[in-house]
Image (cartoon, helix red, strand yellow):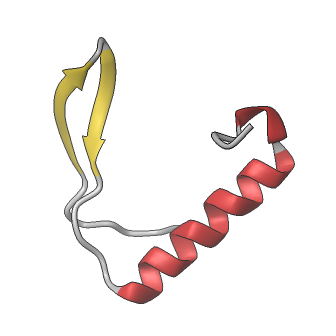
């Protein structure tokens, strides 16, 4: 179930919050990441950004 994004890198904080550059990945990885994020948001609706 893991996702490997090899170009993941830390960056300078933005507005006092940690910031991570996700970098590049292939379309399959991006699709899988989107699916996992949607599943997590469905399980925890209070964390959805579009509320």
The residue drawn where x is 22% and y is 22% is 13
Viewed as shown, does residue 32 lie left or right of 12?
A: right
Q: Position of residue 29 (x, y in %)?
A: 44, 79
Of residues 8 and 49, the one nearer the viewer is 49
Instruction: Judge left or right: residue 29 versus residue 36.
Output: left
Is residue 36 found left or right of 45 in the rendered image?
A: left
* Residue 1 seen in this snapshot: no
Q: Residue furthest front?
A: 50
Q: Position of residue 8 (x, y in %)?
A: 25, 55
Q: Residue at x 22, y 61 (%)?
A: 23
Give the percent coordinates (x, y) of residue 30.
44, 75
4 relative to 48 in the view: left or right: left
Instruction: Please tell me whether residue 38 is drawn above or below residue 13 in the rendered image.
Output: below
* Residue 4 place in picture, x, y as percent: 38, 69
Specify the farthest residue to the top.
Answer: 16
User: In the rendered image of this protein, does residue 24 appear above or below residue 50?
Assistant: below
Quadrant of residue 34 within the rendered picture:
bottom right
In terms of depth relative to the viewer, which is nearer, 50 or 10?
Answer: 50
Vertical comparison of 4 with 41: above or below: below
Quarter of the image where one finds residue 17: top left
Asked if residue 38 shows in the view, the reply is: yes
């Amino acid at each position: 179930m893991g996702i490997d994004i090899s170009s993941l890198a830390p960056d300078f904080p933005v507005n006092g919050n940690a910031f991570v550059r996700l970098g590049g990945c292939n379309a399959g990885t991006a699709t899988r990441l989107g699916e996992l994020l949607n599943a997590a948001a469905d399980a925890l609706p209070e964390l959805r950004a579009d509320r």
